[in-house]
Amino acid sequence: MDITRVLVANRGEIALRVIRACREMGIETVAVYSDADATARHVRAADAAVRVGPPPAAESYLNIPALIAAARTSGADAVHPGYGFLSERAAFARACVDAGLIFIGPPADAIERMGSKIGARTLMEQAGVPVVPGRTPADQSDAGIAAAADAIGFPVLVKASAGGGGKGMRAAHDAATLAEAIPSARREAQAAFGDGTLYVERLIQRPRHIEIQVFADAHGNAVHLFERECSIQRRHQKIVEESPSPVLTPAVRGRMGKAAVAAATSAGYRNAGTIEFLLEGAGDAAKFYFLEMNTRLQVEHPVTEMVTGTDLVRAQLLVASGQPLPWRQEDLAQRGHAIECRVYAEDPSSGFLPQAGPLALYREPDGPGIRIDSGVEEGTAVPVQYDPMLAKLIASGETRDAAIARAVAALRQFPILGVRTNVAFLIRTLEHPAFRAGDLHTGFVDEHLPSLLEKTEPSELVLSVARMAQSSRDVGASAATGVTMAAFDPWSRLEGWGR
Amino acid sequence: MSGTQSVLRGPAHGEFLVRDGDRVTQAYAIVAGGTTWVFHDGVVYEIVEARPSRKGHRGAHVRSELTAPMPATVVAIKVKPGGEVKKGDILIVLEAMKMELPVRAPADGRVEAIHCQPGELVQPDRSLIDLE
């Protein structure tokens, strides 16, 4: 069952992450690309690259026949799905196996079991894992959904039964907002997952989002790699993740780890997965509820790698090739603190609207304890067709304060120009007193939004830099020219603001 | 800017060295279209040439045209020409990057014309609907 050549069925930073792990293990890689990504970094990094279709994801990165054909013609013997796209599609895992390829992930039936929210809940209840009150109504009409919400009690969350990532998720505090939420949640679910079935559950107020990384092999071993706190979210999508959680006590951490392993085992799980929980309350009395299982590698997996000193992608490849897990539970410990900030092309002051266009200037920071996982470079045009995440900045340090300080310093040295990003927003989040105090909940961003969006007026020096950039463009000055700007008049025609 | 402040071009594209008294820092700047983007001390500034304010910009009894904020697909049109709308009503639902973006009425008014169709891919700043 040796793996010698892996087709990476994804794009961007996660494709590069998988390609790097393969290279370190002496495994060849095949990248796939849509026409929008023909010269992207992941294409150049792989040993071979195959076009799978035009830019729309449905015709390229979600095109199962094209991906299987690419694996076959390129001589791959295994497929890594990354995250997003087809990573949690049982049909894709099955198509790989049917084509004689190793799927680097869980078995198709485990994806199916955990992919259906209703099935996963039932399974968790049987395994003794606590769940949030909720259901997928058999009657999927607007009236059927509304009746389910009444029975559960407001406030409720309406979300896609078929997937995660916050797509198709809506909160409703009463019948009127619910009526508005249902059709749009259904359309978004249909667009994102090809399945408009909706799930309704009780909205737990001021919860923390804490998830446990689990890993299981084909020899009956299953371990957890502790928690990640992912309470900082916007539009129900995580933007800052850290480990350890600033509030979890050893007793609660132990209970959650045990529950997560029980959950994975009851699902017949194999390879890397994440059990997401909502945490209510604090101290040893804090309660946790199973939210869902992500049957794939997570975006935020580096946080776990940094505090446990592991390589989760390497472990994925080992387990997929039939080897036992490289660690026993007693080998694993959390050391220091790690925090990940997701850098997005988006405009926080317009409701985090995704942005597209060329990255005219893009320079990544570095330094001790800083890891950048990215899939873009200067000149890359951020396409409209895909998720607009540009990079993950992961900072680690001996303590939470040290990790935060490193993350802030690195974000302050991360110039990205030409497309709006959330960098300034991330800095304000990390510097917020409530964040520093570890006072987190999933509504943190909404609660503190105005202070997180504050803008800085450009100083006279900043305006001088702008003038100089403009004048050097106008006259085509050579890069080595030095000009002292002190004699210039103020640039009265211009107005500016900082983001 | 005082005599102790100066800006020098740096060695690489878009790089500038900023001297402020005895402190020398690095700044980055590029010009793209009508906007000059500057990065200094961890803050991005978008500096645009001042323009006269656009006609019909948000106000009662004024025509306002609503545009797509980014390339997007029209998934639903919630109103009909001539229909009355209240501030905050959803007029059109766009979808981009798998997320829905509702276009809401900026003020009470009446729909004068609709310039898009469900399923259509619309470009930024393209007029979608006129309100009166």
Image (cartoon, coloured by chain):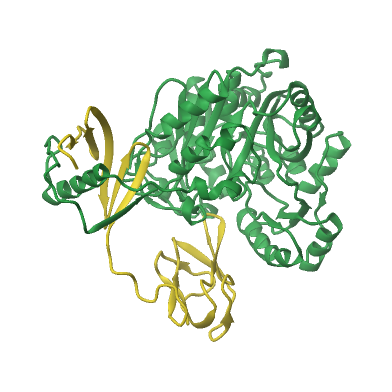
Q: Say if A444 sits above or below B118 in the image.
A: above
Q: Which chain is yellow?
A: B
Q: Is residue B105 left or right of residue B11?
A: right
Q: Residue furthest front?
A: B2
- Rendering quarter of residue A362: top left
Q: Which of A386 and A48 lies nearest the eye of the viewer?
A: A386
Q: Is residue A53 left or right of residue A206?
A: left
Residue placed at 40% from the left, 73% from the top? B57
Q: Say if A471 sits above or below A310 in the image.
A: below
Q: How many marks?
A: 0
Q: Residue furthest bottom?
A: B82
The answer, for residue A226, to whether it is visible in the render is yes
Q: Say if A395 sits above or below B125 in the image.
A: above
Residue placed at 33% from the left, 51% from the top? B46
Q: Which of A465 and A374 lies nearest the eye of the viewer?
A: A465
| Percent coordinates x, y for residue A87 in the rendering | 62, 41
Q: Colour of chain A?
A: green
Residue placed at 53% from the left, 32% from the top? A340
| Percent coordinates x, y for residue B20 in the rendering | 23, 33
| Percent coordinates x, y for residue A74 in the rendering | 48, 36
- The quadrant of the picture occupied by the N terminus of chain A is top right
| Percent coordinates x, y for residue A150 in the rendering | 84, 60
Q: Which of A180 and A225 lies nearest the eye of the viewer?
A: A180
Q: Residue furthest top?
A: A331
Q: Is residue A104 left or right of residue A21?
A: right
Q: Is residue B30 left or right of residue A199?
A: left
Residue placed at 71% from the left, 41% from the top? A207
The answer, for residue A385, to whether it is visible in the render is no
